[in-house]
Image: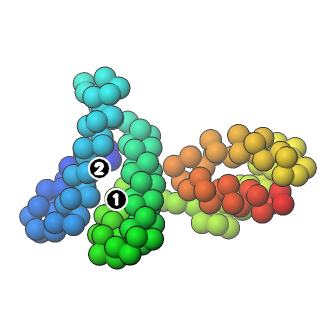
Amino acid sequence: MTIKEQLNEDIKQAMRAKDKMTLEALRFLMAAFKDFEVNNQKREAGLSDEEAVQIIQSSIKKRRESIEQFENGGRAELAEKEKAGLEAIMRYLPEQLGEDALRAIIKESVAEAGASGPQDMGKVMKVIMPKVKGKADGALVNRLVKEALG
């Protein structure tokens, strides 16, 4: 079952359960999927799971930014609503790598890139990102690479 098919099933379940928060978040995600399909002429071919993961990550990033903005603006109720939506869509991401696993991959990538210091950050990121794509947050990877080169 593809991510999109699973999302469709979960939308139906949320409708049956009358879970408005989850339903709203899932419909928003489905709209993002359909928007991507229309913009990239993929209506017949459908959406690949890799593309779906990219859309989900983008949506998660937007929600995190919204949460931060709402908290800075003193709108706790809207921040909580966004957090609930964030939890609902995060389950569609593949299993995320832990910090320890990431550190091991980073150590390997630093050696592979022949990096000697912070000036080689770009080289290391070029090597590591294809390995962890969809499995780790880019900001976390960036921070850990800085620590490793630091």
* 136 to the left or right of 3: right
Image position, residue 51 (x, y; %): 41, 38
Above or below, 63 relative to 37: below
Q: Amino acid at mark 2?
A: Leu
Q: In the drawing, what numbered circle is on residue 89?
A: 1
Image position, residue 146 (x, y; %): 76, 58
> By what rule are the colours in the image chosen?
rainbow
Q: Residue at x 30, y 43 (%)?
A: 32
Q: In the drawing, what numbered circle is on residue 48?
A: none
Above or below, 51 relative to 8: above
Farthest front residue in view = 73
Q: Residue at x 26, y 58 (%)?
A: 25
Q: Secondary structure at mark 2?
A: helix
Quadrant of residue 104 within the rendered picture = bottom right
Task: Report the front residue among 143 and 135.
Answer: 143
* 132 to the left or right of 26: right
What residue did someone put label 2 on?
Answer: 29
* 64 to the left or right of 18: right
Quadrant of residue 92 within the rendered picture = bottom left
Image position, residue 60 (x, y; %): 42, 56
Task: Report the front residue among 78 and 133.
Answer: 78
Q: Are marks 2 and 1 in contact (CB under 8 Å)?
A: yes
Pick whichever of labels 2 and 1 is earlier in the sequence.
2
